[in-house]
Image: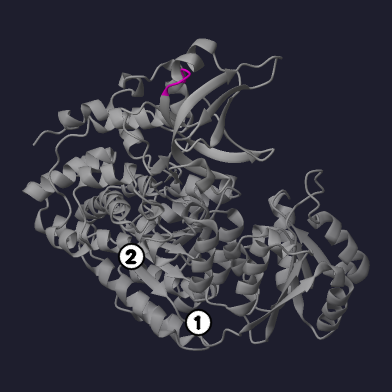
Amino acid sequence: MPKGRPPSLFPLFAAIDTLPGIGPKGQAALMQMGIERPRDLIMTLPSSGITRRRIQRINQVDPPEIVIVDVTVGRHFPPKTRGRPWRVHCTDMHGDDLTLVFFHPRRDWIENQLPTGARRIVSGKVELFDGLAQMVHPDHILREVDPPPAAFEPVYPLSQGLTQRMMSKAISAAMEHLPEVSEWIDPQLLKERDWSGFADALKLAHDPQSPRDLSPDSPARTRLAYDEFLAHQMTLALVRREKRRLKGRPTSGNAALRRKVLGNLPWPPTNAQNRAVDEIATDMASDRRMNRLLQGDVGAGKTLVAMLSALIAVEAGGQAVLMAPTELLARQHARALEPLARAAGVRLAALTGRNKGDLRAQLLEDLAQGRIDILVGTHAVFQKDVHFKDLRLAIIDEQHRFGVAQRLELSAKGDVPPDMLIMTATPIPRSLALTQYGDLDLSVLDEKPPGRQPITTVMISDQRLDEVTARLKAALDRGARAYWVCPLVDESEVSDLTAAEARFQSLRAQFGEEVRLVHGQMPPDQRDAAMADFVSGRARILVATTVIEVGVDVPEATIMVIERAESFGLAQLHQLRGRVGRGQEASTCVLMYHAPLGETGARRLTTLRDTEDGFRIAEVDLEMRGAGDVIGTAQSGLPRFHIGDLEHQAGLMSVARQDARALLDRDPSLESARGRAVRFLMWFMQQDQAIRLISVG
């Protein structure tokens, strides 16, 4: 089987200026749109269309309307003064008048196009000017022998320097390079959906006959979206197979340490937690390396699942590491896990960038000698001088910004790479989970532990600030603790959002020494001291930016005030609200907004007020913002699809995933007729990185 790109695809992957009519200026304009090769042009479908109505006479026009009409060219009226238009008087077959208007035309061009006395078919927008019908710069001027313009004409996205005509001609030229291809879609699915072949679907998509053909649900576009999804899911299936091929070490525990931890809990784990731990234990016991995603809503109890999973590694005589994206989170995790480690009788240590000198050297020696069972840290645990005696499990927290490529790199570390558990507290709609994490097995925590209190969420205008602080004072008098979240750190000329510094000063004036401030630009030791005061109760109000969004755990905190709540994303608001409701007391979240509230802001806040279900919130977030924004495309490795629409075609992605896995099971080296066709598809869809993973399975 040839290893490189099939020669039949070479013309489609040549430079864009190999197409007729594309010079340096056209190439530069196309490059601005990310179009570098003829293949990119083919995958750029019309974004809208123009309906042109054929009429017999001008008085049938309903201005302003785009029409096609036959006219006889009459007298030309060149401009008498600079800046005035050139007018051409025409009549239809019934003698009705139509004036064609041109700005700055060349005399030879206009007299050649519209010679007096000639019959022409013209098409464009007819408008009334002083009661007279006129058409400014017709889109089409055709002779009677020319084919008439289409009744429905595609409109392509453009950049400066491109016209619709240039785009259409370039796409027609690119389409001529499309080779004959074998079918890669499962015959049964093709029949069920009544889809045409790939080339026919592309031709239909580029030649829509009505607005219906522009819809993502049209058969041609649905088929092409499926082609993109199938290539992507084949990539994930190959990455998944490659990871599974990496031999792991069977790691089985005797449950002794886990029993000690469970015996010390105030209430039993949820069914979802038990199920997740069972799935992880089964994966770790096999000789294949575990690659699992643990997805749990705010407060679903991921920390306990992580600890029980780590203890499986320790019971088997090995070590576990938990990595968090920030120092604040790493130390938070260490604090939360320490009582559980004590209950189990194992040694847990934290390693971040702040460990220096002798202390760090001693910690690293203990780790290398196996005297530390569980290490918690930031990415600092990847530094060259960090050695484990027997690392069995790596847990990565909050890494939804970790793309497939980075996960491949991470897999390559170590002689026998450890089992891997990735945790996220960001509920991701299933369609995105399939796209982003299709190479991983999924465990979902969809129940709350019994001790979690419901959170009352209220919306209130910032004009009622005095009322909010009065209620806050009453709650503090009863022993409550509160977060007060502000969007920005300091006053900015471009934004009137209240600064955390200013809010801290005003609350300090009201509540005195009981107020602390935490934000991302503070020195770490000051931030830790402020947090420690809040955790211990020396401080009762913590004014903060979004540094507290993830992982901060103070069960005594029962009030969350979010200022300018409309300026936050839905997922972020849900995460912030999840900082309260962690103890025995009822909790409240106050969404303080600045009136008037726009439609988007109102929908965000009412969604949050009406539900605590993170997955429902994530679905609304996806509808409102689109897939790239929900995960953060730049950091996530989330693919950009030309035609596929993740928000509206989630079901199609799911079918593609099942199909890709089934095909790879049946034909591991993709040598069958359909397997070879799928290889071709993957080359066409630029999944080159994955193609090298195809080998005899």
Q: Nearer the viewer, residue 435 or 509?
A: 435
Q: Secondary structure at mark 2?
A: helix
Compared to 292, does 125 lie above or below? above
- Kind of residue sitting beneath label 2: Gly
Please tell me in which quadrant of the rendered image residue 206 appears: top left
Residue 448, label in figure? 1
Give residue 400's position: percent from left, percent from top: 46, 56
Residue that extends furthest to the right in the rendered view of this protein: 509
Q: Quadrant of the N terminus?
A: top left
- Kind of residue sitting beneath label 1: Lys
Q: Is residue 132 visible?
A: yes
Q: Is residue 695 visible?
A: no
Lateral position of residue 131 relative to residue 653, left or right: right
Q: Are marks 2 and 1 in contact (CB under 8 Å)?
A: no
Task: Check residue 110 for magenta coloring.
Answer: no
Q: Nearer the viewer, residue 168 or 327?
A: 168
- Mark 2 — residue? 651
Give residue 236's position: percent from left, percent from top: 28, 52
Q: Nearer the viewer, residue 398 or 40?
A: 40
Residue that extends furthest to the left in the rendered view of this protein: 672
